Image (spheres, rainbow, N blue to C red):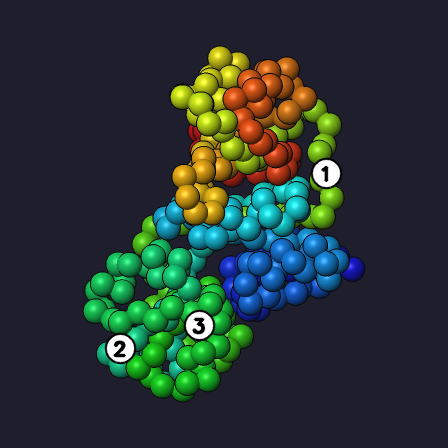
Amino acid sequence: MVTIAYQGEPGSNSAAAARRLYPDSRELPCTTFEQALEAVALETADLAVIPVDNSAAGRVADVHHLLPESDLSIIAEYFLPIRFDLMAVPGATLEDVAFVRSHVHALGQCRKIIREGGWQTLVSDDTAGAAREIAELGDPRHAALAPPGAADLYGLQVLRSGVEDTSDNTTRFVVLARDAEFPPVSDTPMMTSLFFSVRNIPSALYKALGGFSSNAVNLTKIESYQVGAGLKASRFYIEIEGHPQESSVALALEELRFFSSEVRIMGVYPAHPHRSLDHD
């Protein structure tokens, strides 16, 4: 049986993503992202399912700093629609609520109801953990923002359902493995994720990325990360449409390497069907 590590507790969105991707697997909940990645590196788990960004709240902090140091490879991606319910202990009412707790990203995805209620927010390690915490507190003044299934799991009642700010709220997850699995070139739309650091020369980033434009390779994401202290060049994380063995992508990567001091391909994997919806 395949073992899947994720950050969070049973009932969290990460647990839901892991279950949808690998329904017959054994789950390994972890307290931190770093522990989930280490579980794969140390062979305690076979794969890790990790959120990387959300359509409303942006990128998940720390993840991109951890990925290049993990020596793991991205083998798949998954887009999970995100729903949140406001839940509290049985017998509580909306008028009772004074504090709302959840993961910091969930709080950022439910700003409207928090603002309407005028509630104080408290940050928990994850969404399902917030539900467990208020169940243990037994205080009607405390509510949690958690995925719908967490209410039954922890014996809570739903005060309001579907309280996320936007109906198309979506989180993108990636699946990481110890060994790279670069599939062959085919008609299946592919994605390539990689990190690179530019050489310390004028206009290095502009020149490094020029090959993607001249070879008509679509770059879907670029993010920068400062590595350590001082004035060292930033590290960049990019995602592109295509396979490194396609001629246009190969030429673009050749130009990238010429102007970079470091290039590391993190993964080559099939594009999730959700991406085709963005093009429609």
Instruction: Identify the residue at horizontal 66%, vertical 65% (top origin).
Output: 28
Q: Which mark is residue 167?
A: none
Q: Secondary structure at mark 1?
A: loop
* Quadrant assignment for the N terminus: bottom right
Hey, which quadrant is residue 8 in on the image? bottom right
Hey, which quadrant is residue 139 in on the image? bottom left
Q: Find the distance from the CA under tag 1 to the CA under tag 2.
A: 49 Å
Q: Amino acid at mark 1?
A: Glu
Q: Which mark is residue 181?
A: 1
- Crowd band around label 1 with a 10 angstrom C-alpha radius: few (<14), some (14–19), many (20+): some
* Quadrant assignment for the C terminus: top left
Please give the residue where the numbered disc 2 appears in the rendered image.
98
**Relative side of 112 to 46, left or right:** left
Q: Secondary structure at mark 3?
A: helix
Q: Amino acid at mark 2?
A: Ala
Please give the residue where the numbered disc 3 appears in the rendered image.
130
- Crowd band around label 2 with a 10 angstrom C-alpha radius: few (<14), some (14–19), many (20+): some
Where is residue 178? Give x, y as percent: 72, 48
Q: Earlier in the sequence, mark 3 or mark 1?
A: 3
- Crowd band around label 3 with a 10 angstrom C-alpha radius: few (<14), some (14–19), many (20+): many
Instruction: Identify the residue at horizontal 63%, vertical 42% (top origin).
Output: 74
Q: Earlier in the sequence, mark 1 or mark 2?
A: 2
Please state which of residues 88 and 137 is positioned toward the viewer in this rendering.
Answer: 137
Q: Secondary structure at mark 2?
A: loop
Q: Find the distance from the CA under tag 2 to the CA under tag 3.
A: 15 Å
Where is residue 98? Give x, y as percent: 26, 77
Instruction: Identify the residue at horizontal 22%, vertical 63% (top origin).
Output: 115
